[in-house]
Each structure stands twice: as C-alpha cells, then as structure tokens.
Image (spheres, rainbow, N blue to C red):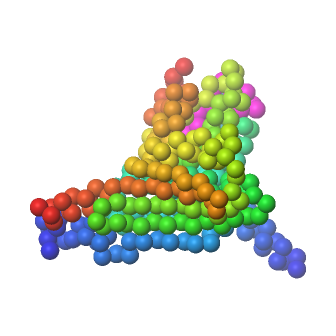
Amino acid sequence: MARNESSAAETADRSDQQDLTVTLEWQDRAAVLAVSGEIDMVTAPRFQNEMSAALEQQPDKLVVDMTQVEFFDSAGLSALVAAYQQAGKHTSVRVVATNGATVRPLRLTALDRKILVHDTVDDALACR
Amino acid sequence: MDIDGDGRAGPAARAASAAVELRCRGVPAEPARFPPLRRMLAAWAECLGMETEQVEALVLASYEALANAAEHAYAGASAGDLELHAVYMAESARAHVTVIDRGQWQPPSTTGTGLGGRGLVLIENLAEHSEVTTGSTGTAVHMSWTVPSAADVLESAHA
C-alpha cells in the first residue's frame, strides 16, 4: 500500500518537473536566471515562482535567459508579466531570447515593448 | 518522378504518400496530457514538409487552443474531454488543425469565447486562418496553414 502511494507521488512529481530547468546566478547586484526546456501550462507556475524568489532578493536587475527555451506559450508570457509587475521600479527585468519559439510570442503579443529583449546575457547586463 | 531534380521525391511527395491525418478523441482536457499531443503535432507537420518556423507556429497555436479547451473543462462541474484533429488537404495544399472541446459550455460573458487574451492573440497571429465557433455542445477552434512546398509541387504538376 505504502509502496503504491509513493510511486504515485513520484509520477506526479515527474510530470511537474517536466522538461524545465532553472538556474539562478548572481553577477554583482544582477540576478541571472537561466531557463531551459519547455514553458507551458504545466511548467509556467514553477517558472513564475523562480522569478518571484529571485525578485524577493531585490536585485537591481533580473535577466531571464531564455536562449535554451524550446517552447513558450501564453502561460509563460503571463508569468513574465507577473514578474514584471512584481519587479516594480526597484528591479529592471530583461529577457534574453534569440530563437523563434521565444521571440515570436513576445513580439506577437507586443510584450517585447514592455520588457526589453536582448541577444546575449552580456548585452542585457551592460544595457541600462 | 523526379521532383527535386536530384532523383529523390521532395517533402510534399513524401507527405502525399504518408498518413496525413491525426485524430485523437476523448482526450481528457488536462494540461498534463498536452505535451505528447504537442510533440505528435510537430512530427506530423514536419512530415508534411513544413519549415521549422511554420511547425513552431502550428504547434504553439494548437497548444493555445488545447489550453482554451482545458479552461472550459475546468470551469465546468465535471472534467470534459476534447478532440484534436489534424488533416492535410492535398487539393488545397493546406494543413488544418481543429480542437473541439465538449466540456461544460460557458455562456457568453465579458471574456467572450473564454480564450485568454494572449492565447487568442497568438492563435490569430500564428495561424494563416483561424476561426472560433462556440455552440451549445462546446467550442471548436479551427486553424489552417498553406504548406508551401506542397503548393509549389501542385503548381508545377498543373503547369
């Protein structure tokens, strides 16, 4: 019985951990969040939580590196908007995106006008 | 038949001979079920000879339609199911994707079709043609794309 319960929990866990890796690094007062994998309805809440946790440490800048993201949907866009709102005036939120899967949704929803999109993390860090 | 000029049949010719229809019925409208559908659609579109950019557009638009169906299902008292249908029409060289949900129908409200703002914007911009039909039995989102390589082959065949 106990074994069945634990295997069910593992399965649930695995679907939550589906194809999304998030790594946080600090460069002086800037938080760089490297995201790889797929951002969709299932993984967007985790994406949002990671950004929120980084923002709670009040960085001057939050750079969301999405160059390794292969799928990005409207739930992911909403998560970015939530982070942008949470950041307020204290933290400048920047996105690094180079492939169509991420650049296209940002552009089509005009979110790239609200949150600046850069080609490299260095650019995002250097740009005021 | 030498379509590419190199003795091999082009992607469109391959598509014409391959299975060109996908139909999944009775899929529970739960987000955890969608990633495999997404990968299946990508493989299907690639098999038709669509370019990467168009495959990505088709997969994201279709996913947003599935997300919409999941929202309908969750809004209702019982979890609904949905139908995903993807078909290639050789005569028009178009790929059609339809997502039908039979979940609890939500009466028209301020949210209109129930599609989230950004989801609908993505569907409308990513699909060459899109249409949302809401009725008493559910909502159908229909999207289509021209498969360029197939269109070229059809044209040269008619010339």
Q: Position of residue B28 (x, y in %)?
A: 66, 67
Q: Position of residue A83 (x, y in %)?
A: 67, 34
Who is closer to the viewer here, B1 or A24? B1
- Residue at 14% across / 71% down in the picture? B2
Any magenta on residue A6? no
- Residue at 73% across / 64% down in the picture? B79
- Residue at 68% across / 29% down in the picture? A85
Quarter where residue B19 is shown? bottom left
Q: Position of residue A110 (x, y in %)?
A: 51, 32
The answer to whether residue A24 is visible is: no
Who is closer to the viewer here, A88 or B32? B32
Quarter where residue B44 is shown? bottom left
The answer to whether residue A6 is visible is: yes
Q: On the rendered image, what quadrant is the C terminus of chain B found in? A: bottom left
Task: Tell me: residue A10, above or below residue B120.
Answer: below
Q: On the rendered image, what quadrant is the N terminus of chain B found in? A: bottom left
Q: Which residues are magenta?
A: A54-65
